[in-house]
Image (cartoon, rainbow, N blue to C red):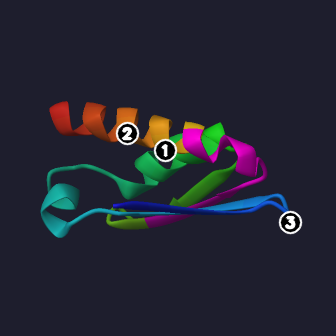
């Protein structure tokens, strides 16, 4: 699951990525996932394999972050 919020006034984006334990055990990383999404909004992130968060400074790019997240998780799941 990836959640995102934006604050137009503050020019901030917050992203939170969570993976189930079985996906983390398979080697998938919420950190990798959220960092790819954060790059689309001019930010970075970190955390654990199962739960990570990120921030950015381009709220108008939130749809791009979701598109990047989708592409990333599809790639991770197919590996």
Q: Which residue is mark 2?
A: 70
Query: Looking at the image, do the residues carrying marks 2 and 1 touch, with CB atoms under 8 Å apart?
Result: yes
Left/right placement of residue 68 relative to residue 54 reads left
Is 57 within the magenta?
yes
Separation of marks 2 and 1 at Cα, in angstroms: 6 Å
Q: Is residue 74 above or below residue 43?
A: above
Q: Which residue is mark 3?
A: 10
Residue at position x 57%, y 42% in the image: 63
Residue that extends furthest to the right in the rendered view of this protein: 9
Residue 57 spot, x, y in % from top left = 78, 52
Left/right placement of residue 3 relative to residue 19 reads right
Q: Is residue 35 above or below residue 1?
A: above
Separation of marks 1 and 3 at Cα, in angstroms: 20 Å
Query: Image quadrant of residue 17?
Result: bottom left
Mark 1, Cα crowd under 10 Å, few <14 / some 14-19 / many 20+, is many
Label disc, if present, on residue 39 of the rendered structure? none
Separation of marks 3 and 2 at Cα, in angstroms: 26 Å
Q: Is residue 47 visible?
A: no
Asked which secondary structure carries label 2, the reply is helix
- Magenta segment: 52-63
Residue 12 spot, x, y in % from top left = 77, 61
Mark 2, Cα crowd under 10 Å, few <14 / some 14-19 / many 20+, is some
Residue at position x 68%, y 44% in the image: 41
Residue 79 spot, x, y in % from top left = 18, 31
Left/right placement of residue 22 relative to residue 27 reads left
Residue 43 spot, x, y in % from top left = 70, 49
Query: Looking at the image, do the residues carrying marks 1 and 3 touch, with CB atoms under 8 Å apart?
Result: no
Q: Nearer the viewer, residue 42 or 8?
A: 8
Asked which secondary structure carries label 1, the reply is helix
Q: Which residue is mark 1?
A: 66
């Amino acid at each position: 699951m990836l959640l995102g919020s934006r604050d137009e006034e503050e020019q901030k984006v917050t992203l939170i990525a969570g993976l189930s334990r079985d996906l983390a055990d398979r080697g998938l990383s919420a950190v990798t996932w959220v960092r790819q999404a954060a790059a689309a909004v001019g930010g970075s992130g970190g955390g654990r394999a199962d739960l990570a968060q990120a921030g950015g400074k381009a709220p108008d790019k939130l749809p791009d972050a979701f598109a990047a997240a989708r592409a990333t998780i599809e790639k991770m799941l197919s590996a």
